[in-house]
Image (tube, coloured by chain):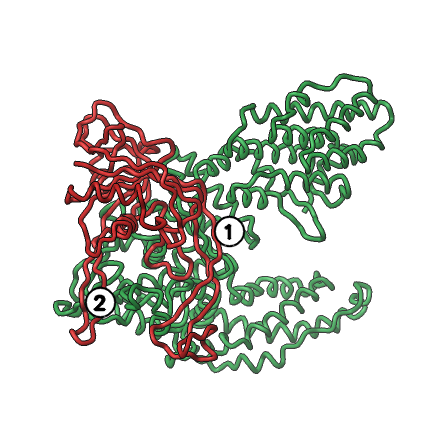
Chain colours: A red, B green
């Protein structure tokens, strides 16, 4: 399977958790949907192209930072007591809130579209981005350090592969449950370590309203992963690229 | 009621804390762990849930409630009466007056008034409030002794009143309702607000039935309902739900006003709604987080629910046992519990423990980065020695332990703190409750931090030790020449040089000193030249050696023990 491998760097970034509206909490690494969204935006895709993604990386530390928050309701009329900003006849609330930011993020990402003919197109989109690439919020600019076309092969390992220096990964939960990987800081007596997340991957639009008054929700496809630092064990099968990086494709 | 078991599985921290709160409330014996991250319970566990809910808060936080402050006076009251007020002196009178003022304030507060309506009793507590007045305090103990019999008579009359108030509050109904009211405004409202008994417009006065009808009944009703036709799904547990009426906006610092601020969600269409059962679980959030005086802490161990319950209960008992509500016990409990984990054959991957702190009505998260955690673990001895170390700067009391931990969390080094400590020691030693060994410990921790941040190779204790020795021996030489009065000026100049990391200035001063005492410059000083952080460490350790014991070594121990 052909894939695009990215080495990325970001300075201060927030990968928001979906339920954190007031304090914007961040995931430790970008969730799949964020990366898939970035690929779609850079390639200009209008509909979902099925793809598999592996996310690994690390960050140095975390800080809380203030940001200006704008809140409004579509087509809500301006009210002096409620809104701080008037736009035409409409009103917007302005205030401050806090966002959690990751500092000095390094990422190692594999992207493998199901339709393999798209590989070159996606590769080109990263080599010559049509606009500045961002990952996370719109302002979280991305430094692309390396883009490489790689071939992922399912290999039974002869030797175990440790995670890159201090790198963490999203590992599919089954892989951890079936003990195909060794969580690096694993200790006897504890079945598995790390933090579990249910990450969003892709969605389909579902109309819960009527035809006339549509009420569109995104019905998310969520995947169960463990965020941890791992060693891929020998005698187990993994997706490996030619530079001997393990990819935990989801 | 359909008796299907109900399952709860761990998710994000807020949910996890709520699940743990739920387990705390119903009791661990009423749930069974079926997988590492999942528990099951019978719907019967929800019978009388509202009583268990409040009982948990009242029992757990009993000693922090104002109700307890009223009732707790009973013992004192008995003692005085038993020995016929022999030991009653001016101090006791002052204490009594403070107590009376507190009681007056409490029993006429709105939350107490609301509780009276629920208590079935003839007694009119508010009428006591008017009669209960403080007693005039004599100027001094002599005057007190003169008027003692009169004062004691007054006191006896107050005691009669107080006894009635205490009896009223200490009754089982008093505890049930006043305690619950206390818990609501001290504990529960830290986690959620605006609905049920915390809705300011609620029609139901009885907080127990309000909670029951708002949370419990809707949940049990939902459990029994036929869900076949429901088209929406709960965001947390994915169960089918009928409508979008339950959102997260009742949780503090979490949701948003769904009706008026829909820009928060995709396409202005809020899809984050929960089922009534999840809402009931979320209402247990305050029982999962540990609160002390408007601050809270929760350790989000996501892998094993049992461990999560155990760790948090350990912290809870530790924090609530300490009477002091300052920051120190929270940090200290946190750190020592983390140490215990480490010692517990290092069962947990420390780096993945998310710590949620609740402060100033907002949540803060710390995934303690592993290097920083290691610093805390590795320097346990040094850190422990700093717990009671304080100094006063601009009239503000600064706790060195808090400063150090805070800086470790923020990935900062400690040079500015060390500078402040040494400067304080030089300018006004009476306001510094520490000695040289404490400075040394801070320096050692700082070395650890610097080596984590990169660029440090030398063994950290070695450099600090050698430089301090150099400082001390130079100081002795000055003493031998009877020139110790010169040391303060030298230290000031050295500190200025260190603050600006001006190596030339530092060397100018030290060379001058060694010339004066006619001896060789120690190797440790010249070795550190041109090595950035090592130079600063050497310099500060050297200065701390120079300063140490300046105010007479006999004072040292006493100062260190200071407040």
Q: Please tell me in which quadrant of the rendered image residue B26 appears.
A: bottom left
Which residue in the protein does label 1 denote?
Answer: B321
* Same subunit, tags 1 and 2: no
* Residue under the point 44% across and 40% down: A60
Name which residue lies at 55% across and 63% down. B72
In the image shown, does B231 or B310 lie closer to the viewer? B231
Q: Is residue A193 left or right of residue B223?
A: right
Residue B338 x %, y %: 45, 41
Residue under the image location 63 percent in, 27 percent down: B464
Q: In which image quadrant can residue B254 be found?
A: bottom left
The chain to which mark 1 is attached is B
x, y percent for residue B107: 55, 75
Q: Is residue B297 above or below residue B422?
A: below
Q: What kind of element bears circle 1?
A: helix
Q: How many marks?
A: 2
The residue singled out by tag 2 in the image is A216
Residue farthest left in this picture: B228
Q: Secondary structure at mark 2?
A: strand
Give above or below for B100 relative to B300: below
User: Nearest the camera: B69 or B511?
Assistant: B511
Instruction: Pinpoint residue A37: horizontal percent, then vertical percent.
Output: 27, 52
Using the rendered image of the protein, determine whether residue B10 is visible from the camera's viewpoint: no
Structural distance between the alpha carbons of marks 1 and 2? 52 Å
- Which of B111 and A113 lies nearest the eye of the viewer? A113
Identify whether B408 is placed above or below B57.
above
Contact between labelled residues 2 and 1, with CB atoms less than 8 Å apart: no
- Looking at the image, residue B289 sits to the left or right of residue B6; the answer is right
Chain ID, mark 2: A
């Amino acid at each position: 399977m052909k894939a695009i491998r990215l080495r990325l760097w970001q300075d201060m970034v927030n990968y928001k958790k979906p339920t954190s509206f007031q304090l914007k909490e961040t995931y430790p690494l970008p969730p799949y949907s964020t990366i898939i969204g970035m690929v779609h935006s850079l390639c200009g895709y209008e509909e979902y192209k099925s793809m598999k993604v592996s996310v690994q990386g690390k960050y140095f530390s975390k800080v809380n930072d203030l940001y200006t928050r704008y809140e409004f309701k579509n087509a809500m009329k301006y009210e002096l007591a409620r809104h701080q900003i008037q736009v035409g006849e409409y009103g917007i609330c302005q205030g401050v809130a806090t966002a959690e930011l990751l500092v000095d993020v390094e990422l190692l990402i594999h992207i493998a579209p199901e339709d393999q003919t798209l590989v070159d197109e996606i590769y080109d989109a990263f080599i010559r981005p049509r606009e500045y690439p961002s990952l996370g919020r719109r302002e979280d600019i991305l430094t692309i350090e390396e883009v490489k076309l790689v071939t992922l092969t399912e290999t039974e390992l002869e030797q175990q592969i440790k995670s890159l220096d201090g790198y963490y990964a999203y590992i599919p939960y089954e892989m951890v449950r079936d003990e195909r990987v060794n969580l690096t800081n694993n200790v006897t007596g504890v079945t598995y370590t790390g933090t579990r997340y249910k990450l969003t991957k892709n969605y389909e639009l579902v109309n819960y309203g009527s035809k006339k008054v549509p009420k569109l929700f995104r019905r998310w496809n969520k995947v169960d992963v463990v965020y941890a630092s791992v060693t891929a064990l020998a005698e187990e099968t993994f997706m490996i690229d030619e530079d001997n990086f393990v990819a935990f494709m989801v | 009621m359909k008796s299907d078991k109900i399952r709860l599985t761990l998710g994000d921290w807020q949910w996890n804390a709520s699940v743990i709160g739920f387990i705390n409330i119903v009791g661990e014996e009423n749930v069974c762990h079926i997988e590492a991250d999942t528990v099951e319970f019978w719907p019967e566990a929800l019978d009388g849930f509202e009583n268990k809910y409040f009982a948990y808060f009242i029992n757990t936080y009993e000693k922090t409630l104002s109700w307890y402050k009223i009732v707790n006076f009973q013992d004192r009251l008995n003692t005085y009466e038993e020995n016929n007020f022999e030991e009653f002196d001016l101090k006791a009178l002052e204490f009594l007056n403070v107590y009376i003022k507190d009681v007056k304030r409490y029993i006429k507060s709105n939350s107490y008034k609301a509780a009276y309506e629920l208590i079935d009793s003839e007694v009119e507590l508010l009428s006591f409030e008017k009669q209960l007045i403080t007693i005039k305090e004599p100027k001094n103990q002599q005057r007190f002794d003169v008027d003692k019999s009169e004062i004691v008579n007054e006191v006896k009359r107050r005691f009669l009143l107080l006894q009635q108030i205490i009896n009223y509050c200490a009754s089982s109904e008093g505890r049930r309702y006043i305690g619950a009211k206390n818990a609501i405004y001290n504990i529960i409202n830290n986690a959620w607000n605006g609905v049920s008994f915390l809705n300011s417009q609620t029609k139901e006065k009885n907080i127990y039935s309000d909670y029951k009808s708002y949370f419990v009944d809707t949940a049990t009703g939902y459990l029994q309902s036929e869900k076949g036709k429901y088209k929406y799904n709960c965001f947390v547990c994915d169960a089918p739900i009928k409508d979008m009426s339950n959102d997260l906006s009742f949780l503090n610092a979490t949701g948003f006003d769904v009706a008026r601020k829909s820009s928060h969600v995709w396409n202005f269409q809020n899809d984050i709604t929960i089922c009534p059962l999840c809402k009931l679980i979320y209402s247990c959030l305050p029982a999962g987080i540990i609160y002390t005086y408007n601050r809270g802490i929760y350790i989000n161990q996501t892998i094993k629910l049992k461990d999560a319950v155990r760790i948090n209960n350990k912290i809870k008992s530790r924090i609530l046992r300490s009477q002091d509500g300052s920051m120190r016990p929270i940090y200290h409990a946190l750190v020592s519990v983390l140490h215990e984990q480490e010692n517990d054959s290092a069962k947990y991957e420390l780096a993945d423990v998310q710590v949620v702190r609740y402060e100033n009505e907002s949540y803060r998260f710390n995934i303690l980065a592993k290097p920083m955690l290691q610093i805390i673990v590795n320097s346990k001895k040094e850190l422990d020695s700093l717990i009671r170390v304080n100094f006063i700067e601009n009239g503000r009391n600064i706790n060195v332990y808090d400063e150090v931990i805070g800086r470790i969390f923020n990935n900062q080094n400690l040079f500015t703190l060390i500078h402040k400590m040494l400067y304080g020691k030089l300018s006004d030693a009476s306001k510094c409750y520490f000695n040289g060994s404490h400075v040394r410990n801070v320096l050692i921790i700082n070395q650890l931090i610097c080596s984590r941040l990169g660029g440090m190779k030398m063994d950290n204790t070695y450099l600090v030790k050698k430089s301090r020795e150099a400082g001390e021996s130079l100081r002795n030489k000055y003493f031998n020449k009877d020139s110790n009065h010169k040391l303060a000026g030298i230290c000031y100049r050295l500190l200025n040089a260190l603050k600006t990391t001006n190596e030339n200035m530092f060397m100018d001063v030290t060379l001058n000193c060694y010339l004066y005492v006619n001896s060789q410059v120690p190797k440790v000083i010249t070795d550190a030249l041109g090595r950035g952080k090592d130079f600063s460490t050497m310099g500060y350790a050297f200065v701390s050696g120079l300063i140490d014991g300046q105010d007479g070594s006999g004072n040292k121990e006493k100062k260190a023990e200071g407040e």
